[in-house]
Amino acid sequence: MGVDRNASIEDIKKAYRELVKKYHPDRYQDNPLKDLADEKLAEINEAYEYIMENYEREQNGSSDSGSYSNSSNGYGGYDPDFQRIRGYINSRNFVVAEEELNRIGTRNAEWYFLMGSVLIEKGNFYKGYTYIKAAVNMDPDNEEYQSTLDDLNFKKIREYISDREDFSRAEEELNKIGTRNAEWYFLMGAVLINKGNYSEGYVYIQKAVNMDPDNEEYQKALDDLNLNKISEYIFADRADRKDFSRAEEELNKIGTRNAEWYFLMGYVLIKKGNFSKGYEYIQEAVNMDPDDEEYQSALDYFKNSYRAKNGKYYDKSGESNDNTSCEQSCEVCICLVFGIYACWNYFHS
């Protein structure tokens, strides 16, 4: 369990709570590591049972009959029936777990929590949610119960956001949750952005990334927001060289190198005069996302306009011209100074 041999009972309980949260089945839904996490959680429960049994024996003068328990049977509440049922749940034997729970007459917080977990795993989300909420109401200080309830609430809120697009309801439900973890900030940020409050939503998603920097979903969402922001000011009517330099600087801060990143960086480089490299970047964007019409259109446009190859400019007939004429230089200037639409009109006039 990662605790010192001479650790206090409170330190052991704290370590157990943290490990249960880390390896809880709800965190590994549709995850290839789910089986490994289940095995790990079973080992943790077994180790905890052993420690608590020995602790209780020492407290009772090495009596074999004593076992540690409390009224809520929470983290520290050792009950052999409930621990056995947890083992069934961890091994995904939900039918046996439910049968065993129905034989137990005690309807305490642990019973409701385990029955709720079983019902959810068997597909009865609504009733299972009600049971876990009852467990929290009976033992509000139990971190495992509260964490599980929060995770279920987040799952429900994700449905409001993605399936129903009911952002007002999602915001209302989020404000009822006391836990302000990374998931809370991420979902609230998404809600605020969809309701039109971009600046505050961006701050919330940034905070989610800071709290959980290894979460790929949070990082991708933040990168997408940054790319959207960069796109807005480089395609603005009055964008100038300072804007493109700033855009290049901001793009280099983004870790995600997706098709949109290559497209925007290519556009920025072309606007700054580095046509050859910019063209390669837009080509890469098309290779990564060949179905995107905007990328393909831009690539076709630049290819037809410049016919760039090996650092040389080619005229429309395909003939190489190493000595770039004044007319060709002006063509380049038109594109760089007046933008893509002026360039298109010039070449097609």
Image (cartoon, helix red, strand yellow):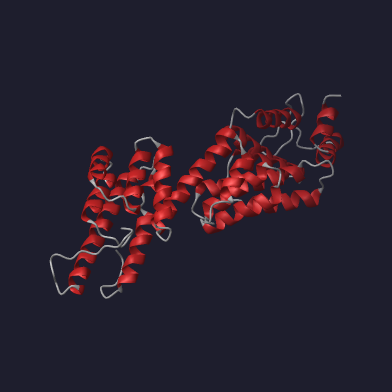
* Residue visible at 34% across and 70% down in the picture: 11
Given residues 334 and 338, the one toward you in this image is 338
Find residue 312 and report its horizontal and vertical position in percent. 71, 37
Q: Can you say which quadrant of the picture contains the C terminus?
A: top right
Q: Is residue 133 left or right of residue 311?
A: left
Q: How many marks?
A: 0
| Quadrant of the rendered image containing residue 55 | bottom left
Q: Is residue 165 above or below residue 223?
A: above
Quadrant in the picture for residue 71? bottom left
Depth check, front residue: 172 or 307: 172
Q: Quadrant of the N terminus?
A: bottom left
Say whether residue 255 is visible: no
| Residue 246 x %, y % | 74, 53
Q: 107 and 197: which one is in front? A: 107
Q: Is residue 343 above or below residue 190?
A: above
Is residue 125 visible to us here?
A: yes
* Relative horizontal placement of residue 349, taking residue 218 as reference (left or right): right
Horizontally, residue 224 falls left or right of residue 74, namely right
Q: Tell me the residue at 21%/69% (across/down).
A: 56
- In the depicted structure, whether residue 319 falls above or below residue 6: above
Say which of 16 and 101 sits in front: 101
Quarter of the image for residue 93 reads top left
Residue 137: % across, % down: 43, 54
**Left or right, residue 163 beside residue 199:** left
